Image (cartoon, rainbow, N blue to C red):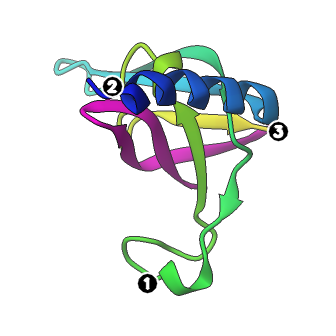
Amino acid sequence: MATLDVLFPGLTVRLIDRFGAMASLEVVTKTDDLVSGNVTETVVSTEIKITPPEPFTVGLIDGSLVEAGDMTSLVAARDLTARPAINRDRLVFALESWQIVAVDPIYSGDTATAYRLQLRT
């Protein structure tokens, strides 16, 4: 393991902790009742620090993978017990709720130091 691989995960946590903002990661579990046809949703919220959501650069908006209005945010990988699930989990920041539609890991060596979240209302 290289020296930078040891330094970057801690540095990522410290920078997001210092300059980031509090948000709530909602892990959603849906259960189908095959008899009644009802779907129940269980939500477990965890407070995390993120970089405040910001819009995607106009040149990246293609109308399918990245839509107008999509936002991006970073979360330190070390702060999470599991990688957020796309099209299931939500992020709540400043009383606004976003669906997580993509999760891209940012690696230092073979270790994820952060996740770039693509958020959609």
Q: Earlier in the sequence, mark 1 or mark 2?
A: 2
On screen, 57 above or below 10?
below
Query: Which residue lies under the disc numbered 2?
Result: 38
Q: Earlier in the sequence, mark 2 or mark 3?
A: 2
Check if mark 2's residue and mark 3's residue have beta carbons within 8 Å: no
Query: Which residue lies under the disc numbered 3?
Result: 94
Q: Residue at x 58, y 64 (%)?
A: 70
Q: CA distance from mark 1 to mark 2?
A: 36 Å
Front residue of 107 and 81: 107
Q: Residue at x 24, y 32 (%)?
A: 110
The residue at the far front in this view is 3
On screen, 103 above or below 32?
below
Residues drawn in magenta: 95-121
| Badge number at residue 62 | 1
Q: Amino acid at mark 3?
A: Ala
Q: Amino acid at mark 1?
A: Asp
Q: Residue at x 26, y 27 (%)?
A: 37
Report the quarter where the N terminus lies: top left
Q: Earlier in the sequence, mark 1 or mark 3?
A: 1
Category of crowding for the residue at label 2, using alpha-carbon neighbours closer than 10 angstroms: few (below 14), some (14–19), many (at least 20) = few
Is 115 one of the magenta-colored residues?
yes
The percent position of residue 67, horizontal first and vertical second, equals 51, 74
Q: Is residue 87 visible?
A: no
Q: Relative to 49, is 72 on the left or the right?
A: left
